[in-house]
Image: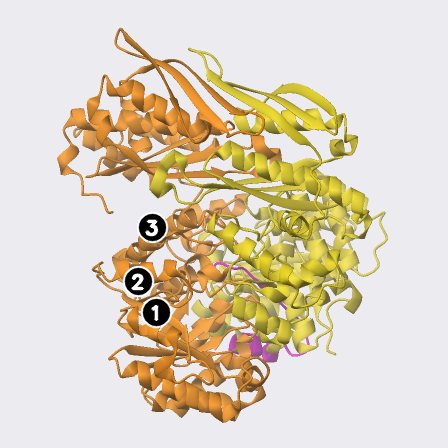
Chain colours: A yellow, B orange
Amino acid sequence: MAKIDVYDTTLRDGTQGEGISFSLADKIKIVKLLDELGVSYIEAGIPASNPKDAELFACLAEIKLKHAKIAAFGSTHRIGVPVEQDSAVKALIDAGAPVVTIFGKAWDLHVKEVFHARLSENLDIIRETVCYVKSFGKEVIFDAEHFFDGYKQNREYALSSLNAAKSAGADIICLCDTNGAAFPDEISSIVAEVKAYLGGTKLAIHCHNDVGVAVSNTLLGVFAGAEQVQGTMNGFGERCGNANLCTIIPNLQLKRGYDLVPKESLKKLKSISRHIYELANIVPDERKPYVGGMAFAHKGGMHIDAVLKNPVTFEHISPENVGNERKLLMSEMSGRALVYDIIRKFEPDTKKDAPVISEILDEIKRLENEGYQFEGAESSFELMVLKKLGFYKPQFQLEQFQVIAAAPAKSQYTATAMIKICVGDTAEITAAEGEGPVNALDKALRKALYRFYPELKNTRLIDFKVRVLDGSKTGTAALTRVLMESTDGRTNWSTVGVSEDILEASWRALVDSVDYYMLDIKRNKHTERSKATC
Amino acid sequence: MAKIDVYDTTLRDGTQGEGISFSLADKIKIVKLLDELGVSYIEAGIPASNPKDAELFACLAEIKLKHAKIAAFGSTHRIGVPVEQDSAVKALIDAGAPVVTIFGKAWDLHVKEVFHARLSENLDIIRETVCYVKSFGKEVIFDAEHFFDGYKQNREYALSSLNAAKSAGADIICLCDTNGAAFPDEISSIVAEVKAYLGGTKLAIHCHNDVGVAVSNTLLGVFAGAEQVQGTMNGFGERCGNANLCTIIPNLQLKRGYDLVPKESLKKLKSISRHIYELANIVPDERKPYVGGMAFAHKGGMHIDAVLKNPVTFEHISPENVGNERKLLMSEMSGRALVYDIIRKFEPDTKKDAPVISEILDEIKRLENEGYQFEGAESSFELMVLKKLGFYKPQFQLEQFQVIAAAPAKSQYTATAMIKICVGDTAEITAAEGEGPVNALDKALRKALYRFYPELKNTRLIDFKVRVLDGSKTGTAALTRVLMESTDGRTNWSTVGVSEDILEASWRALVDSVDYYMLDIKRNKHTERSKATC
């Protein structure tokens, strides 16, 4: 299997994306995660840009990595400053990373209009910088900025910028589509031509996603001779992001047999992707190939039927290969086979034609007509099955609640909830204030339950979604569906409630959340379930 | 410029995506939006699948569209049932759409393992179904399901399935990458070969994004001879989604000079994309090419500097071409013209550089940071401008309200609202019951106002939407945005409110709705506005 280097720039190009920033501790965690994944290079930052990056390089010098080499990123030296006196170049060398990636200009327009240099001067600057950094024994990667735009407007000049870097001893030359506007029908021939032009020098490709083809261009670059792919985890990066390594790595390794990362670590891809989303405090894009929560989700009845007959009909790989899993979505469209699968978790001896299956299918239909939706609310679904099977026992009885929301003249809005519940023969009455009626009721219920179920103190809501089902019919009295996701820090579970009354819908989802957690603890199923990503 | 048909399947393939469902009213809105964008075909649904889709086709028959033809989607006829007796085929014809899209199997594995038919039998079924539907004078598109997988495993058979459709009179043949696993280096040669094989028959391409290259494959399909692109708005669709038309349309039209939609309507692309996200109740992906809020956002200092020197350095197109905007200059440039336009409705003599414009732009920024969004809430936007201009006078003063929602033991949930308001020196106090706290408050407010503003009796809410902005941070106390659409039977207007308290957010949108209507009546602008769409 041909080896392809993975060069990750999540910590540098990734952080140029809007809303993405990492603390020093986050960055060190990400370096370790990337090393665990088995990438070959980690571009950690720009040592000259700020003290935080400089500190990071100092920390990284102390950490022993299994797979990855650390790269420091910076520009060619400034015009009019001799390379050995350029403080940014000095910072690059002083960072102590074994690899230095130097970006330089390959587009004549950019040289003239932004860099304000003569064309030949820019070539000298590339040559001098690469040569100088090489003299410190560094491995040097030359990033040819705007290479594809440059090539299309002044082919000779773009190529001569590469040649300047090569002749000065650059180990790897990277073709950057900085504006992310190259088209897939251009990449192959350009990369192949450069490959021939440069002879034996190793080529890398670095794409952005501004026309939505960064992954494709990277693949085509490899097929045309590039031996290194540059990108970011989850496609983080400026504007529309960089080429997404979470897609590129499995594409090349699972589909075309290239060797990018150790086979076993590919199974951690989804979990590492999630961990990095979490550190970036960005909600994961569940529609992303391979690692998204929906990547192997099936909803249409015919599709579910086909996948159960033979997975290849609607699954291009086995989800386990990237640590993901198949998700059969509960909906009107889906069928018997799916319900059977779930019942067997509780009653393994159930037959395929047991009448309870039809009863449950009827119940799903009835509830879906009422506005329920069990995709994304698997725990409410399980509770419904348990009820039908006669296994369900409520964890508490509601005696009453009363929520008062008020807006007194010229002062703050307030919301308070009073609640009385019973567990067995013991009653508890309490109250709480909150941000609005739903939040007040949520807090009061939890407060009332802690006395009986102290375990609940470990739980909290991590997502709350409200969907007005058809506000066009009845305005504020429209049917409303509330989805909640809860966690105890180790596992997550999701529940649903539907009503014309938004408070009642929220209440139902809340009750399911509590019931499910307590039943689950009692089933001792707890430890079996997969760990939450945290 | 070569014409390329845009075939939109947001309403069919799009809704097979997890978490995507539309009401009938939503679907009609989407059809109108797509027609406004200027697509050639709109696949509206599967008439045989459920009564909701059948109702949709009946409504669509009444609507006159400028650009788009409506297509009904369904399968080839069932095995063992003569085509003229197949109820699903009958439903396809009865739907009354001028175009019928029939999907059939092109992959031998699928025919054998899922369809359980003999290979020749499947070809007969394709032929019979296409021929039968053609006999009703329909334009027929044949969707060759799993075509690329089929081609790679049994080239002869895959091609013969196309030939079966062609020989039966299909007008257009569509090559579907149903599993979304085709690679960009395969597409061109396969499409070109099929093109030659089928002679003059028009070819379409339909890609999914499971390996992250749906857009790229669609482009390559067109370059190899396809004359129709199938996809969805925002890339909605099963698993990782369909090819994203919001990327494909500008790619082909702006970059390669193909003719897909009217040039002017391309400028509405971002706003239509947003509107459809909103109807789907899905948070827009701001990193999406062309239409994402970050697509032209510049963060890196060097990049900002370069963009200011010459935009082409880091912008592959002018964002205005797709109705988007450069983020860094938002407050100075893009908002300005819009705000200027609105101000002139009230103060026709306002100068382009009036300081109030900057004040309003600052206010927009502040409110957007708070979670407001004025797209789909134009009336709240106008009110905000009126406030800044000093023209706003509230229609009433709130003295206080109190909402009580209760769940007494074993009986119905109830919600009541008491409200006291003043108009001038006259106070009114009243109360109402409702379905939940929001509805009770809505009813009480209207009741209190009727005495002063009997015109309000003609008005009602026709849409009510709740969006929890980030439920993952604070659960039931998350920031919530409420959008309301109101009507008096002749015109519609839309308002917005934001708060951590769902009741307060609803209250703000309600107050805006009343204020706007009464101000509008007083301006006597009423009759000038366009008639409500119903």
Q: Earlier in the sequence, mark 3 or mark 1?
A: 3
> Which chain is home to disc 2?
B
Magenta segment: A189-210
Counting other residues with Cα less than 10 Å from the Cα at mark 2, is it few (<14), some (14-19), or many (20 or more)? many
Q: Nearer the viewer, residue A302 or A182?
A: A302
Q: Quadrant of residue B63?
A: bottom left
Q: Nearer the viewer, residue B466 or A329?
A: A329
Q: Which residue is mark 2?
A: B57
Q: Dot 1, how many residues are within 10 Å of its Cα: few (below 14), some (14-19), or many (20+)?
A: many
Residue situated in front as seen by the camera: B205 or B414: B414
Q: Position of residue B181 (x, y in %)?
A: 57, 73
Q: Mark 3 belongs to which subunit?
A: B
Left-right relation of A405 to B133: right
Distance from Cα at disc 3 to Cα at disc 1:
18 Å
Mark 1 = which residue? B72
- For disc 1, the chain is B
User: Do discs 3 and 1 belong to a common subunit?
Assistant: yes
Separation (CA) of disc 2 from disc 1: 8 Å
Cβ–Cβ below 8 Å for labels 2 and 1? yes
Residue A172 inside the magenta-drawn segment: no
User: What residue did someone put label 3 on?
Assistant: B25
Q: Residues within 10 Å of mark 3 (few under 14, many from 20)?
A: some
Residues A390 and A93: in front is A390
